[in-house]
Image (cartoon, helix red, strand yellow):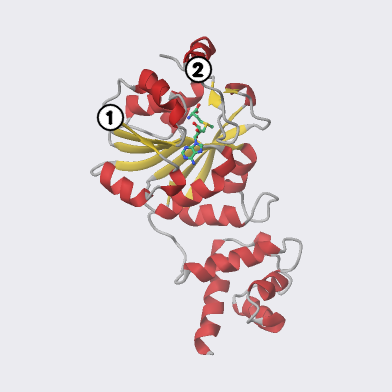
Amino acid sequence: MDVCDIQVMKPLLARHGFHFSKAKGQNFLVASWVPRSIAEEAGVDETAGVLEIGPGIGPLTQQLCLRAGKVCAVEVDTRLKPILDVTVGEFSNLELLWMDVLKLDIPALTEEKFAGLRPMACANLPYYITTPILTALLEADCFDSVTVMVQKEVAQRIAAAPGSGEYGAFSVFCQYYAQPELLFDVPAHCFLPQPKVTSAVVQLRVRQDRPWDIPNPDTFFRVVRASFAQRRKKLANGLASGFAELGKAGAAEVIAAAGLDANVRGETLGISEFAALAREIDRRRNTL
Ligand code: SAM
């Protein structure tokens, strides 16, 4: 059953008295090339165990189930139960979990459900909670890859290079855990109801090794947040506010000791530079 076919979808939804919930970020796909391309580009095959977030009425779920060893799909809206029974009930490699993905213990679920399989995450994400979901997926540190559809501007931020306008703390966070690649855009007319924005599919290939010296990730991420908190100002100001214990003079010393120019701006730094700053801050702390 092609649930992306509007002639199929509309009567199906009407039969079950289903109305879209804006609050739950429900924009369902009505272009069947999209879920097919997501599943293909994600590299899903029988060796994969796939966690899907927000199956909706199941267009991506179908494509994942056709390819994967196992699929676990987490959906918060129980009104979709009878519809998913019809659209994906036939798949024996599918397990549906009815809960809020943000309350899920993702590493435990992955270990329990995907033993012997290559864990991946794949989703057309509800846009109102893109950042917390991506944060949870990456911090779970248990997937080979995370392939998601998000707002195009979020996808660009995820993959942004240092110095670009889109580059920010979330870019660094994502690139610390994974190597992002923008795959393709999805125009608004591919959804019902149509969102106001263009969407894009981004793949995050999770790093097996992190090629930086970051002994204390807490300090590293604190440095990153402090560096972007005052975007238009010099790094010294951001560091001095984010690390009050350093003061202005201490911040300038840390920047010099990390081998950076005194006038540098945080938004031009890459992960190895943030790492050098974090190591220098910890070194000073430990020698006090
Ligand atoms: N996968 C479907 C598609 O592509 O047509 C639906 C995608 S729709 C953008 C997002 C889906 O996520 C909806 O089905 C919504 O009910 C579900 N959702 C929203 N918040 C959620 C949460 N906290 N946990 C799990 N699912 C959620």
Instruction: Tell me the kind of residue under disc 1.
Output: Asn
Q: Secondary structure at mark 2?
A: helix
Quadrant in the picture for residue 210? bottom left
Name the residue: 31% across, 51% down: 108
Determine crowd level at label 1: few under 14, some 14-19, many 20+ residues with C-alpha closer than 10 A. some
262 above or below 70?
below
Q: Secondary structure at mark 1?
A: loop
Give the label on residue 13, or none: 2
Q: Amino acid at mark 2?
A: Leu
Circle nearer the viewer, 1 or 2:
2
> Between disc 1 and disc 2, whose residue precedes?
2
Residue at which label 1 appears: 93
At label 2, counting other C-alpha atoms closer than 10 Å, the crowd grade (few under 14, some 14-19, many 20 or more) is some
What percent of the width, then of the height, locates residue 201?
A: 53, 35
**Is the N terminus in the top left, top right, bottom left or bottom right quadrant?**
top left
Relative placement, left or right, of 59 versus 169 is left
How far from the left and from the top, in percent, is residue 16? 47, 17
Image coordinates for residue 46, horizontal then vertical, percent: 28, 32
- Give the residue at x 44% y 26%: 80
- Picture quarter containing residue 190? top right
Q: What residue occupies the far top of the structure in this picture?
A: 7
The residue positioned farthest toward the left in the image shown: 116
Quadrant for the C terminus, please. bottom right
* Residue 114 seen in this snapshot: no
Task: Find out if the beta carbon at label 2 lies less than 8 Å from the nearest ligand 1 atom.
Answer: no
* Side of 264 relative to 8 (left or right): right
- In the displayed structure, 97 sits above or below 7; it is below
Residue nearer the viewer, 247 or 203: 247
| Residue that sits furthest to the front in the current view | 17
Residue at screen point 45% across, 24% down: 57
**Residue 174 picture location, percent across and down:** 52, 52
Task: Name the one closer to the observer, 183 or 196.
Answer: 196
